Image (cartoon, coloured by chain):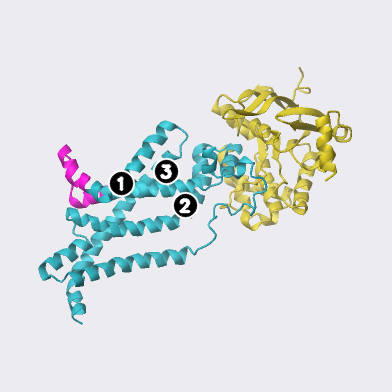
Amino acid sequence: MSMLNEWQDYLPDFLDGLVVTLQLTGVSLLLGLPLGLALALAMTARRRAVRWPAILLVEVGRGAPALVVLYFVYYGLPQLSLTWSSFACAAIALAFTTSAYTADIFRAGINSIPVGHREACQALGLSHGKELRLVVLPQAIRVVVPPLVGFCILLYQGTSLAFAVSVPELLSRAYSQASITYQFTATLTLAGLVYGAISLAAVALMRARWPRRAPTVAGAALPPERPDRTNPSWETTSERRER
Amino acid sequence: MTAESRPLLALDGVCVAYRHHEVVHDVSLEVASGEVVALIGPSGAGKSSLLRAINFLEPPSKGRVLLEGAEVGGSRRSLDALRRDVGMVFQSFNLFPHLTALQNVMLAPVHTLGVPPAQARERAMQQLTHVGLADHAHVKPGKCSGGQQQRIAIARALAMEPKVMLFDEPTSALDPELGAEVLATMRSLAAEGMTMVVVTHEMHFAEDVADRVVFMADGRIVEQNAAGKLMRDPQHPRTQRFLNAVRNR
């Protein structure tokens, strides 16, 4: 019973922290997702000069731990006389990590579109831009929504790293309460429950809107078997690139 | 040379190579306006590659493609013009699954030709009626049979009002019954005077509908002749071997 009573005291402060956590998640996604899509398009571009810098950026973003990126932005950039608030630093760092991870998700979505659809666009005289906008992306988006939601949940939990640069988000609140009362078990359990409740709600929401189905949404118009494996139109974009 | 005798489509010494592996060697072919040419031959003969070279889905590694006497390629603009005038139907249909049949057919006229949507919609309905699928206008391709999908794909290509239609084994992914409805659509198209180049394994179609049959093997044209002649009286031993094998199946 005593833990519940303590929780009652903590909860208002924690909910303020949750608001900051959600803001940080939102801003990171708002900046990171468009950048991720742009990187994915650059990574699948025909020109090497476009492709390689994007691949480099993505590999750095996925290779470096988010905390390292965060420290780099928070402590490193002021040495180049760039100083932002801790919230801005956390948002920039997490947006960069988001863009790197989601770029790969978007790229997988784009590559899952059968190359035949793109050939059909070319044969119809559609420009490269229209091919992407009208045919490739609308199909790719459907493929990438579930993994993107998964990433968003990871990011939401990952915002707890901002604790390290003293953004007053959920984990910071839990920690500062605990440092006063020494009730680490109670505070961290409550913080965990708040993180978990939002995460599970997001998953449930996605499941309701996006019931599990055959993974080939993009290939729905294809007949089930591939009668002639040598025919180039049957390849997916990634298979084609390997050739 | 008069306009009458000038071929609508001409290939001049076309080669197609994947990396350094050449699969079509120095093929020249002329197609007159209104003519139906069937390309037959064993798998790997380069028929599909040659067909794809005509609209630069596989740009020829050597040689020229001429449409109405004008050389194609080089500039983006001439390529766009070529693709407006050359319709293509694929073995795997390649319909856009997120769009309805009608939207599939409208897409290119609206976005490449700049036809106003209302007008494009009307024309798309006409094309769907033409292939007997007006009642499927608002259905997505995934809900249609393979034969219906291929007929939608034909309507989509026709909506650009092309001068030539290319067919890349249009019935190979279909069972014989569904293939028959696609062939019937193609027959009526041929009867209306459409210029067609058809890669096919349907020997009856080649014999009955095509004006001329071209037999390819190992990346070259081995023999070509009026359809009836080539099918009944092949001259080259390789053609004889192929036709015997097909007939005795």
Gap in Å between the C-alphas at discs 1 and 3?
Answer: 14 Å
Specify few, some or many for label 3: CA neighbours under 10 Å numbering under 14, 14-19, or 20 or more.
many
In the displayed structure, does residue B219 sit left or right of residue A197? right
Q: What stretch is highlighted in magenta?
A: A71-92
**Which numbered marker is on residue A127?**
none
Depth order, front residue of A211/A2: A2
Specify few, some or many for label 2: CA neighbours under 10 Å numbering under 14, 14-19, or 20 or more.
some
Labelled pair 2, 3 in contact (Cβ < 8 Å): no
Q: Mark 2 points at which residue?
A: A141
Residue drawn at (15%, 39%), measured in percent from left and top? A79
**Type of amino acid under label 3:** Ala
Q: Which chain carries label 2?
A: A
Dot 3: element = helix
Q: What colour denotes chain A?
A: cyan
Chain letter for the yellow part:
B
Residue A18 figure quarter? bottom left
Q: Which of marks 2 and 3 is nearer the N terminus?
A: 3
Residue drawn at (46%, 64%), measured in percent from left and top? A209
Gap in Å between the C-alphas at discs 2 and 3?
Answer: 12 Å
Q: Name the residue under label 1.
A: A96
Q: Quadrant of the N terminus of chain B?
A: top right
**Which numbered marker is on residue A40?**
3
Q: Tell me whether marks 1 and 3 sit on the same chain.
A: yes
Q: Earlier in the sequence, mark 1 or mark 2?
A: 1
